[in-house]
Amino acid sequence: MKFTWLDFFITILVLLLISISDFLIVTILACIVKSLPIEYQGLFNVAIFCAVFLILLGGVYSRILRFISPPADAIFSSDDNSMQCIIWKQTVFAYEWTASILTYVTPVILRPTLFRLLGAKFGKGVLIAGKIVEPQMVEIGDYSFTGEMSLLMAHALMKETVVLKRIVIGNYVSVGAHAVIMPGVRIGDESIVATGALVSMGTVIPSGEVWGGIPARKIGNIDQSHVIPESAASA
Ligand SMILES: CC(C)(COP(=O)(O)OP(=O)(O)OC[C@H]1O[C@@H](n2cnc3c(N)ncnc32)[C@H](O)[C@@H]1OP(=O)(O)O)[C@@H](O)C(=O)NCCC(=O)NCCS
């Protein structure tokens, strides 16, 4: 992927503006910090600076980017300097410096909130134990979950071409641990993606099926054994 002088200029300008705003906020909050015991003041200033930095870059800046260029399926060259390409590179930069770091330090119970703030559309009771790149391009229905170390990736970079496609996951879907879901994948209600599967670009998994392997293929249909463990069923 090629970065142009404009990418560097925008990135440095954004970092500069965010850092200046951050210093101003820390200065304003200094009167509160001063009321704390002296030995904690430095620690609080650093904590406030980091928190505000993450909010401004991951929350405010990524929202501005989504406002300028709403997330949509697209294919473009990584060095064409189009608005869409510049915005995509900035979105990746904002993501890498915020969500990418925060994903693994945020408790699983709070991860859906983190990804919602970054633009993901989730239904009720969604559980995210893995990673989502481009959360603004991901929709997950009610009570679905993604397993430990799974990866939902709505972009694919091939030579100089960037493919961006929405990932849509239905209700009660299980995405196994270490599974990789590529751009444009659609998974129907109640289906299961097996542990370690690679669901390649544009694959459509119908409702009620089990898919696994590399690349993922249908390996079965959902039956009671996938819903109720044998021991519980026979009890
Ligand atoms: C796919 C899955 C649902 C299969 O469960 P199951 O039906 O009890 O599995 P079985 O052991 O009876 O195997 C059924 C078939 O699927 C195949 N299979 C099982 N797990 C597979 C996997 N991870 N990848 C590819 N094929 C798999 C088996 O080889 C078998 O094939 P065969 O009929 O040709 O011999 C389960 O293995 C799985 O991956 N669940 C996801 C769990 C998870 O990761 N949760 C998130 C973390 S908590």
Image: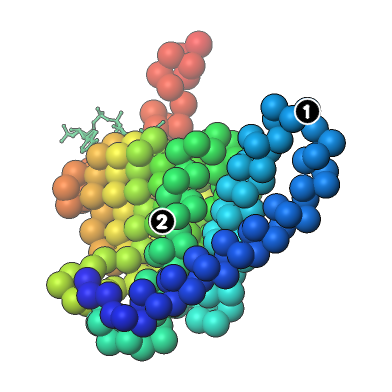
Residue drawn where x is 55% and y is 82% of the image: 68
Q: Position of residue 95 (x, y in %)?
A: 45, 59
Residue drawn where x is 53% and y is 75% of the image: 65
Asked whether the viewer can see residue 62, the reply is: no
Point out the quarter of the image occupied by ligand 1: top left
143 is higher (above) or lower (below) than 37: below
Outermost residue, front side: 38
154 is higher (above) or lower (below) than 128: below
Q: Which residue is mark 1?
A: 37
Q: Position of residue 66 (x, y in %)?
A: 54, 74
Q: Position of residue 114 (x, y in %)?
A: 57, 50
Q: Which residue is mark 2?
A: 96
232 is higher (above) or lower (below) than 19: above
- Looking at the picture, tell me which residue is in the foreground, 203 or 129: 129
Residue drawn where x is 64% and y is 59% of the image: 22
Asked whether the viewer can see residue 198, the reply is: yes
